[in-house]
Amino acid sequence: MLTVILSFLLTSVPLTVTYDGQVVDELMREDFELHYVDPLLIDETKLELQMDVLNDKMYKEPTDAKLADNGNIIKEKPGIALDRMEFKNGFRDYFYGRDTAEIALPERTIYPRVDSELIAEIREQEIGSYATDFKENNEERSRNIELASEAINNHVVFPGEEFSFNEVVGKRTEEKGYKRAPVIVKGELSEDIGGGICQVSSTLYNAVDLEGIEMTERYSHSRSVPYVPPGRDATVSWYGPDFAFTNQLKHPILIRASAENGNMDIKILSATDGQ
């Protein structure tokens, strides 16, 4: 009986949640009571789900440092996420009537994976490169090659880390700008969204085929392709084969990829003592 009375006394005022001075949510204490055990206990599962919702309202993804086309370093930008521990402490104070019924969303800084200092260190030496040609007049295929090149450009692979082409480039969709273009399926030419990006993965394979780089997944097409010598290709498909490798060097490597004017070019950069 005492538990019920205490719970009732603590339910009247909602918790106002603000961010940047604006109200983003109002939470009611009774919605987070663990009713079937004890209303004076917090339902931690519901609270975690609520924090996911609040995090989405404030989240800013960090931006890695990268090299511009002119060789200058573009500085990194930190991101922002909800400080879940601090918010949880504030919510507990509200839940048990120990604080006012308003809380500003606490921020946690998310540091970028790659900063300017790292880029400056690993851009010093070209340790691998490869170039292939494509027909610019095939606009759909050319566009797919350009988009996949942009996706891998400036990607850093740390020592011991595996690079997955499918993971880095992501699913090829019309929403991302990919077009229908010829692909090879079981030895036959067909059309699919993203056709042509195997030229990017194949060019990358030849550029990173170096001492200290271990190929962990690679498949050849079921028929020869015109842009690389026989046996030097790397086919990829979102629901099928991937191209992957692991960096076993003692320094990170930086992938520089470009596709313009009918030329697909990839350079692999690292520190001067990258071997």
Image (spheres, rainbow, N blue to C red):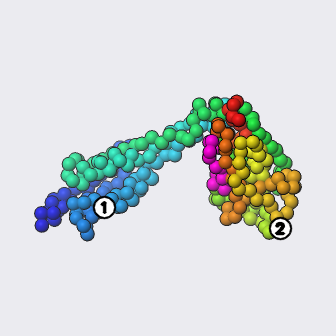
Residue 53: within the magenta?
no
- Give the residue displayed 46% in from the left and 48% down from the top: 59
The N terminus lies in quadrant: bottom left
Q: Name the residue beneath numbered marker 2.
A: 187
136 or 77: nearer the viewer: 77
User: 93 or 207: which is nearer to us?
Assistant: 207
Q: What range of the chain is rendered magenta? A: 157-168
Does residue 65 show up? yes
Does residue 40 lie above or below 253 as drawn? below
Chain-order first, disc 1 or disc 2: 1
- The local crowd at label 2, few if under 14, some if 14 to 19, many if 20 or more residues have their Cα within 10 Å, is few
Please state the horizontal and vertical placement of residue 205, each as a whole percent of the image. 76, 49
Residue at 25% across, 60% down: 41
* Depth order, front residue of 243/63: 243
For residue 153, side relative to residue 53 (left or right): right
Q: Are marks 1 and 2 in contact (CB under 8 Å)?
A: no
Vertical placement of residue 263 versus 193, above or below: above
Query: Quick check: 13 left or right of 134?
Result: left
* Residue depicted at x 12% and y 63%: 2
The residue shown at (78%, 52%) is: 202
In the image, 256 versus 253, the foreground residue is 253
Residue tagged by mark 1?
A: 43
Quadrant holding the C terminus: top right
How far from the left and from the top, in percent, is residue 7?
18, 61
Residue 145 in view: no
The span from disc 1 to disc 2 (Cα, nearest Å) is 56 Å
What's under tag 1, amino acid-wise?
Answer: Asp
Mark 1 residue element: loop
Which amino acid, mark 2? Gly
Q: What x and y, as percent, mark residue 71?
A: 70, 32
- Residue 152, position as x, y percentages in the image: 68, 47
